[in-house]
Amino acid sequence: MIVIKIGGSVACKDLTKVVQNLPKYADRSVVVHGGGCLVNELLKRMGVEPRFLTHPGGVVSRYTDWETLKVFVMAMSWINKQIVSALYALGVEALGLTGADIGVVRAKRKEKVLVVDERGRQRVVDGGYVGRITDVAAERLKPPPLKVVAPVAVSERGELLNVDGDQLAFDVAKRVGAERLLLLSDVDGVLIGGRVVPRLTAEEAEALSRSEEVRGGMKRKLLMAAEAAKLGVEVVIANGLAGSPIDAALNGAGTHIVKNI
Ligand SMILES: Nc1ncnc2c1ncn2[C@@H]1O[C@H](COP(=O)(O)OP(=O)(O)OP(=O)(O)O)[C@@H](O)[C@H]1O
Ligand SMILES: [Mg+2]
């Protein structure tokens, strides 16, 4: 099994390359996607400024109040159906789901979260509608049909919750017992000094996530990749905007994070 995470940066720019490459993997993969850029765009159009929280270690997450949650679910559902409908045109009858659909992704609402404020002090703030994934229904995600999963979870109280796409992709990979996890984004891989780092061990990935040269969404990808690699899942961080991006990632393009080199 391969878990393929289509980054929001790919979904907002150009889905065609990755979608065209998907049919040949439809019988052995699960697709997870992001969509942060569309969430931001819609929020701004509605006059709401996107807000982010910085956690100790530098990982950033979206502050998701009720209004933000509505926009989040709408944006993610749109991207989900863009992928499903594009696949349909290529002869793949995929099933697009949020985590609430048939309860595939369950989470607990993070009541309180630890953040670092502008002055560098740690504070505990309200967690909003953000979830910590507790369970993924792996059996329901195995093809056929190919499942396309949006980063929205459901709580036992029936709340829809924002979950991070990379985190979800990692949890899905772990639960379905995937051999590989592809994180497709809008960069050629992990860039250090302007060059793609071809190979990393889990320990190296963890150390790099703390580097000054790794920012934003890449920090979390490296942390997730390190965790996955430790479990024996090979992670590839590669460009989803390149030609045949899945083939390329499986054939050595991008940054490969493995348990041992
Ligand atoms: N050292 C680095 N190497 C490569 N990319 C980096 C690095 N540091 C920061 N980045 C940024 O990380 C981004 C990719 O992560 P990001 O979370 O923004 O995208 P995504 O995962 O495709 O989107 P989403 O989170 O919505 O699914 C790149 O666009 C790049 O700007
Ligand atoms: Mg991201």
Image (tube, rainbow, N blue to C red):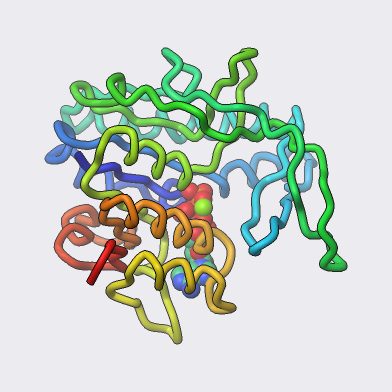
The spot of residue 22 in percent (x, y) is: 21, 41
Q: Is residue 34 left or right of residue 183?
A: right
Q: Quadrant of residue 163?
A: top right
The spot of residue 145 in percent (x, y) is: 22, 22
User: At x 41% / y 61%, what residue is drawn?
Assistant: 186
Q: Is residue 58 left or right of residue 181?
A: right
Q: Is residue 148 left or right of residue 88?
A: right
Q: Quadrant of residue 188?
A: bottom left
Please tell me whether residue 229 is drawn above or below residue 136 in the rendered image. below
Q: Quadrant of the N terminus?
A: top left
The spot of residue 190 in percent (x, y) is: 40, 71
Outermost residue, bottom side: 193
User: At x 65% / y 32%, what residue is drawn?
Assistant: 71
Q: Is residue 19 left or right of residue 209?
A: left
User: At x 65% / y 49%, what residue is drawn?
Assistant: 61
Residue nearest the viewer, comparing 166 with 156? 156
User: At x 65% / y 46%, what residue is drawn?
Assistant: 40
Please tell me whether residue 214 is drawn above or below residue 99 in the rendered image. below
Q: How many marks?
A: 0
Residue nearest the viewer, comparing 56 with 218? 56
The spot of residue 221 in percent (x, y) is: 46, 57
Residue nearest the viewer, comparing 221 with 31? 221
Q: Quadrant of the C terminus?
A: bottom left
